[in-house]
Amino acid sequence: MSSIKASKLSSATFDFEQYVLDCKTQIEHSLDLWMKPHEPEILWESMRYSVLSGGKRLRAILCMAAAEACSKDRETARKAVMPCAAAIEIVHAMSLIHDDLPCMDNDDLRRGKPTNHKVFGEALALLAGDALLMLALEILLDRSDASVTPKNVMAVASELTRAAGALGMVGGQVLDLSYTGQGIERTNAFKALDNIAIDEAILGTIHKKKTGAMIRFSAWSGAKLASANEKQLSTISEFGDILGLAFQIADDLLDVTGDVTTLGKTPGKDEASQKATWVRVFGVEKSQSRLEALEKKGLELISAADFNADAVPALAAILNYAIHRKN
């Protein structure tokens, strides 16, 4: 972690591993409960395969931690955001299914297991992703606790459509495709960009949408559902932006420094496909320096924020994990 020693950022009694375990236990239970199989069974089997296959659950845990930071009671906060946390993980699973398809990243492994299309075929994998996107909104709208105002539920649902859609994750994926494989054979739609040099502005736009939008949403939605005030919402949104960028830079570095055992997916794919990554543009050393700066900025932000002091160590630990993780 950064050299910042503000007392709000650490707690002698705070155990991040136990915190993650507690959050994940609640998340996994809710996902299993709200994804009971229906007809057609093979579709639900495919959906459950990707959603319930483990994973870090970082986005859902961030949603929970943000709610706790803007609430006086942990259990009340978690009850308010659990449907949203589940919806976030379902949308994330959808994105992974689609990312792994042959027409996209063409990957065979995800979370250490065969990718969805390798098990169920491309057509069913595509349909499972479509169904998951709709299921996420269904759970958010139908399962939200009575303690949450309908106005806040609708605001969060509306923001989810933007974060996951053309203005966010999907739009970012298109931009990523646009600058992937420059100079090699690709479709005419993207060839016009072959002579455009990839710089920090382009990278920032790609990753703010592709990765950052859903991470920012995870933080903001948790705070919103906990009835945070405007200052808290602004602060947690900025923290989400910092975390999203840091997560992507760390991901780019792991593609170079990781291995299939620790990553649970194929390393070196970014370089092989000539993706627009921080490492490709700035190199390993400058990418690591940028991570250090983002960590410092994020910790300074939450240490000065008007948050529940007991919840701030969780936010600090999430940032630390996102930057220093090995998978």
Image (spheres, rainbow, N blue to C red):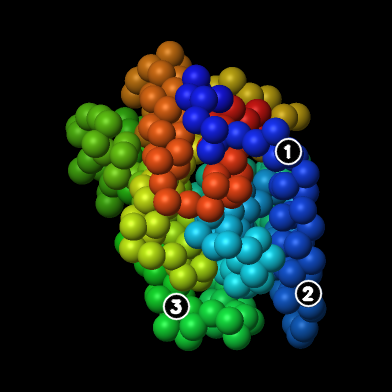
- Name the kind of residue labelled 3 in the image: Asn
Q: CA distance from mark 3 to mark 1?
A: 33 Å
Write down the residue under mark 3.
152
Who comes first in sequence, dot 3 or dot 1? Answer: 1
The x and y percentages for residue 250 are 51, 30
Element type at mark 2: helix
Element type at mark 1: loop
Where 144 falls versus 95 (above or below)? below
Who comes first in sequence, dot 2 or dot 3? Answer: 2
Write down the residue under mark 2.
33
- Name the kind of residue labelled 2 in the image: Leu
The x and y percentages for residue 157 are 46, 75
Write down the residue under mark 1.
13
Kindly report which numbered mark, 3 or 1, lies closer to the viewer in this rendering: 1
The residue shown at (59%, 49%) is 311
Element type at mark 3: helix
Where 28 falls versus 299 (above or below)? below
Circle 1 Cα neighbour tier, 10 Å, few/some/many (<14 / 14–19 / ≥20): few
